[in-house]
């Protein structure tokens, strides 16, 4: 089933190749049907998922069965390297509590992404082929349990994202696309080197051969002591952890590797911003939880304070930058940097509460930020500007839009009763429970204050009060004697139309429901988080040494 959910979008892309470029509606429908089918498969996987199985490492005897679920494992590449042994690469897929939530999120955001791509008119065929390729790469990263296969999917994301921003983006799209490409490629080079070093440092407990299996790599007893990244080579293990952490931190993005994100978001078309914020940023922190931390647990324990400080910088710096923005989309982009800082803080707590909050924050941020960028796209389509000071009093003329914006803004702020509150609360409970991160957590609380400042201030300027003299719309008195607003060059419905409601209402329902009853998500991930905390525990590492 996992192969189908991964490669279904590519199959849709192959079908689109056979469709004439003039048949734009058919191309859109093929992509939508593939995304919906992917969503159905994600629901089936969720229903068949056993939340009691921990994942992270292999079960007794070294086999992944009994720990991971929906496993697909086949030999892929086998090369004889002579005196160096053999190169064994597997097609190895599976899910646990870390990945099941991200699989569901990816399927959901992919559907939203296709729907938000409906107005695209430029080179529609090429756009949707690249979009489907990107969907396959994202889903593949979350279910790959072979490091080499993970790396293939990771690199596969670069090409479609580069072209989707570079061709369908804004005026400075080439600059933003190249900047995104170079930053991500820089991190990928380090990842490749560490991956090769790990291969020759780990053996499969069942076959005795070197392996790229992330399941085998997560168990420290599978490491060769005197290998380059074995437990005896402390310096090389620290170096490998740091460069791998940087590779994932670029994708988060973490300060000071964040500068590509605002440019990419501002220039990217709305659906690509939705995908970028909703799913791609999560790959950075997912990579840390799946690869970086469990493979180098002793270095992770030594780095907790540094990671917490970097998370706090993200939270406060991102919020400050968001507060200074006049461009609504850039404000949301910087808010993403701030909110991903909470994930880093939760991970640095290294306890169940903090890490549950971090993973739940990843899911919630995906749904909330998707809403935010969709809402920015809605107003930009009508006004052809994103400048906050070009609006005012919109709540009187676009009440439905104003209501959905209010839900999204307050969810991002972390208002109790909405999903953002639960995840941030768990992060802070975990951070305050750890002596290492307690002081950093106290400082990080300032991020909530600054977050409220930029969100409430933008809400007030755009939706309350009266129309500004230089607003992006005109006031007209209708036949009914009431004032109405008119956007230049906009012929559609003033308030949210049917397509926009289909995208936004489900996200709003999810945000509200998971803020009241979070157990459908928390119940899936707790067992795996407990196992991850155990793997990262200093007691376990001392016993292994």
Image (cartoon, rainbow, N blue to C red):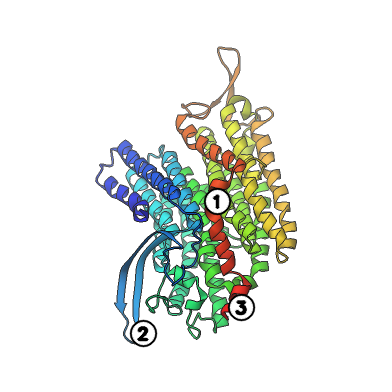
Residue 386 in picture, x, y percent from top left: 57, 40
Side of 130 relative to 485 (left or right) = left
Helix, strand or loop at mark 1: helix
CA neighbours of label 2 inside 10 A, class few (<14), some (14 to 19), many (20+) = few
Q: Residue 523 carries which label?
A: 1
Q: In this view, does 346 lie above or below 13?
A: below
Q: In the displayed structure, would residue 415 be above or below residue 526?
A: above
Q: Earlier in the sequence, mark 3 or mark 1?
A: 1
Secondary structure, mark 3, is helix
Residue at 57 percent across and 28 percent down: it is 400
Q: Which of 251 and 90 is in front in this view?
A: 90
| Residue annotated with mark 3 | 542
Of labels 1 and 2, earlier in sequence is 2
Pointers 3 and 1 in contact (CB under 8 A)? no
Q: Where is residue 328 in the image (x, y as percent from the top left)?
A: 59, 42
The residue sitting at 52% across, 26% down in the picture is: 494
Kindly identify the residue that appears in the image at 68 percent across and 44 percent down.
454
* Pair 1/2: label in front: 1
Q: Is residue 115 above or below residue 482?
A: below
Residue 84, label in figure: 2
**Mark 3 surroundings: few (<14), some (14-19) or many (≥20) residues within 10 A:** few
Identify which residue, 68 or 262, lies in the foreground.
Answer: 68
Tell me whether the residue at label 1 lies in contact with that at label 2, contact meaning CB atoms closer than 8 angstroms.
no
Badge number at residue 319? none
Q: Where is residue 258 in the image (x, y as percent from the top left)?
A: 58, 59
């Amino acid at each position: 089933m996992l192969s189908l959910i991964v490669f279904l979008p590519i199959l849709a892309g192959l079908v689109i190749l056979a469709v004439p470029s003039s048949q734009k509606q058919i191309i859109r429908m093929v992509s939508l049907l593939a995304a919906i089918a992917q969503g159905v498969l994600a629901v089936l996987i969720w229903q068949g998922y056993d939340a009691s199985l921990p994942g992270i490492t292999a079960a007794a005897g070294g086999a992944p069965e009994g720990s991971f679920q929906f496993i697909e494992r086949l030999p892929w590449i086998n090369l004889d390297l002579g005196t160096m042994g053999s190169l064994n690469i597997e097609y190895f897929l599976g899910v646990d509590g870390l990945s099941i939530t991200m699989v569901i999120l990816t399927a959901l955001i992919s559907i939203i992404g296709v729907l938000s791509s409906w107005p695209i008119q430029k080179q529609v065929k090429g756009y949707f082929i690249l979009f489907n390729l990107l969907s396959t790469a994202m889903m593949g990263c979350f279910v790959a349990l072979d490091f080499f296969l993970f790396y293939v999917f990771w690199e596969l994301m670069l090409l479609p994202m580069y072209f989707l921003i570079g061709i369908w983006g804004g005026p400075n799209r080439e600059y933003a696309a190249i900047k995104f490409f170079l930053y991500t490629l820089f991190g990928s080079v380090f990842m490749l080197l560490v991956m090769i070093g790990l291969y020759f440092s780990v053996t499969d407990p069942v076959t005795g051969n070197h392996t790229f299996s992330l399941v085998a790599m997560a168990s420290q007893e599978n490491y060769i002591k005197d290998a380059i990244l074995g437990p005896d080579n402390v310096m090389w293990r620290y170096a490998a952890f740091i460069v791998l952490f940087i590779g994932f931190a670029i994708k988060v993005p973490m300060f000071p590797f964040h500068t590509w994100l605002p440019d990419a978001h501002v220039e990217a078309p709305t659906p690509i911003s939705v995908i970028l914020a909703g799913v791609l940023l999560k790959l950075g922190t997912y990579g840390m939880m799946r690869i970086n931390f469990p493979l180098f647990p002793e270095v992770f324990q030594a780095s907790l304070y540094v990671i917490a400080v970097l998370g706090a910088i993200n939270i406060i710096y991102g919020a400050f930058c968001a507060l200074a923005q006049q461009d609504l989309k850039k404000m949301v982009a910087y808010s993403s940097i701030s909110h991903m800082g909470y994930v880093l803080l939760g991970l640095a707590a290294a306890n169940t509460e903090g890490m549950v909050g971090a993973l739940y924050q990843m899911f919630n941020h995906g749904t909330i930020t998707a809403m935010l960028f969709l809402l920015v796209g809605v107003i930009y389509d009508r006004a052809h500007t994103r400048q906050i000071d070009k609006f005012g009093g919109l709540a009187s003329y676009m009440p439905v839009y104003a209501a959905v914006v209010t839900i999204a803004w307050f969810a991002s702020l972390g208002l109790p009763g909405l999903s953002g509150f639960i995840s941030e609360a768990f992060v802070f409970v975990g951070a305050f429970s750890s002596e290492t991160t307690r002081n950093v957590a106290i400082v990080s609380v300032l991020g909530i204050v600054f977050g409220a400042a930029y969100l409430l201030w933008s809400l007030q300027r755009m939706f309350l009060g009266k129309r500004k003299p230089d607003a992006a719309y005109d006031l007209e008195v209708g036949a009914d004697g009431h004032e109405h607003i008119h956007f230049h060059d906009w012929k559609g419905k003033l308030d949210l139309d049917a397509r926009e409601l289909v995208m936004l209402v489900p996200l709003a329902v999810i945000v509200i429901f998971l803020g009241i009853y979070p157990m459908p998500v928390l119940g899936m991930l707790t067992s795996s988080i407990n196992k991850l905390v155990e793997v990262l525990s200093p007691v376990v590492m001392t016993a292994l040494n």
